[in-house]
Each structure stands twice: as C-alpha cells, then as structure tokens.
Image (cartoon, rainbow, N blue to C red):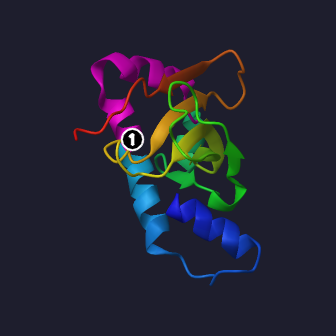
Amino acid sequence: MPAIDHARSEARGEAPAATSRAHVHAYLALRSFLDLVRHDRELADHFWTLIDKPGLWSVLRHTGVKTSIDLPFERAVPTEPPAPHSAAQRAFLLPMRIDANGRPALLVDVVATDARRPYALCGGVLAAIARHPTRDDVRLELHLLAARSGD
C-alpha cells in the first residue's frame, strides 16, 4: 500500500518523483510471490500454461530470454476486498505485466491491502488473477482464503 499511495500522490503532483523505499519493497514482495507460485509443485504446471513464451527467433535474436516486470503503481484503482476479507480497511487492484524479450508474456491483476496484521505474512496480497496475454480462456486465480492475528 505505501508504494501505491506514493505513486498515486506522485501522479497528482503531490509527492517527490524519486523511487521510494516502498516501491522496492513492493517489487520484491511481488517478485517473491511469483517465485513461490513458479516453484510450487502443484501450481507450476498451471503457471507455465499462462505464459506466452517467446519463439525461437526471438530467443536467438535476444541471445536468450530477457524478462522485465512492469508495476505501474500509479494505475492502481480502489476496489472492494474479496470475500472473506471485508475486514481489510481498503484494497487496490494493481495491474502487473511481465514481458519476455520486450513482448507481454503474462498479465496479472493483484488485489492488495495494507500489509499489517493479519495480512503481513502475505505482503498484503489478497488475490492475484493471472492471464495469458492473448488467450482470454487461459487464467489462474489465487485467493487468500483466511487470515487472522495470533493475539
């Protein structure tokens, strides 16, 4: 949430244009989330069907596969927290794109809230809907089913 708040303030001209520490933390949290999904035995097969993999010519021309993650925090929009997380005070939908050799390979809509208890362990991620960039029928939805404080 701090990265989203900072980027939205910056887009309105209310914050300095420097990359905030919150942006770095959010990027690393989402990267870790993707790595977790990518390396999970059950989810990995589903995950790889979502990716629009570059062709042989693209791999040869780029001498491999170069990936990048686009996290336009300023484009996050307020949304209702998904059930059963109505206790989350506020939530945002963040569009995310992963490119491979300069072309979209995966689109992900992340629903996030403040990464405070009970959502600290998941970095505030309540849901993620991943889609193939050209096939609407290929998607993977991940939802946080429950969260509670240990108090």
The residue depicted at 77 percent of the width and 73 percent of the height is: 12
Say if residue 52 shows up in the picture: no
Corner quadrant of residue 52: top right
Say if residue 93 shows up in the picture: yes
Q: Which residue is mark 1?
A: 33
Q: Nearer the viewer, residue 109 or 122?
A: 122
Q: Split into 4 quadrants, where in the image is the C terminus?
A: top left
Vertical comparison of 88 with 140: above or below: below
Residue 51 is covered by the magenta coloring: yes
The stretch in magenta equals 33-54
Q: Is the magenta region chiefly helix, strand or loop?
A: helix
Q: Position of residue 9 (x, y in %)?
A: 68, 72
The residue depicted at 51 percent of the width and 25 percent of the height is: 84
Residue 77 is covered by the magenta coloring: no
Instruction: Name the side, left or right, on which 82 lies relative to 134.
Output: left
Instruction: Name the side, left or right, on which 137 lies relative to 121.
Output: right
Q: Nearer the viewer, residue 113 or 25?
A: 113
Vertical comparison of 52 with 76: above or below: above
Instruction: Name the side, left or right, on which 66 lies relative to 95.
Output: left
Q: Position of residue 138 (x, y in %)?
A: 63, 18
Query: Disc 1 residue type?
Result: Phe
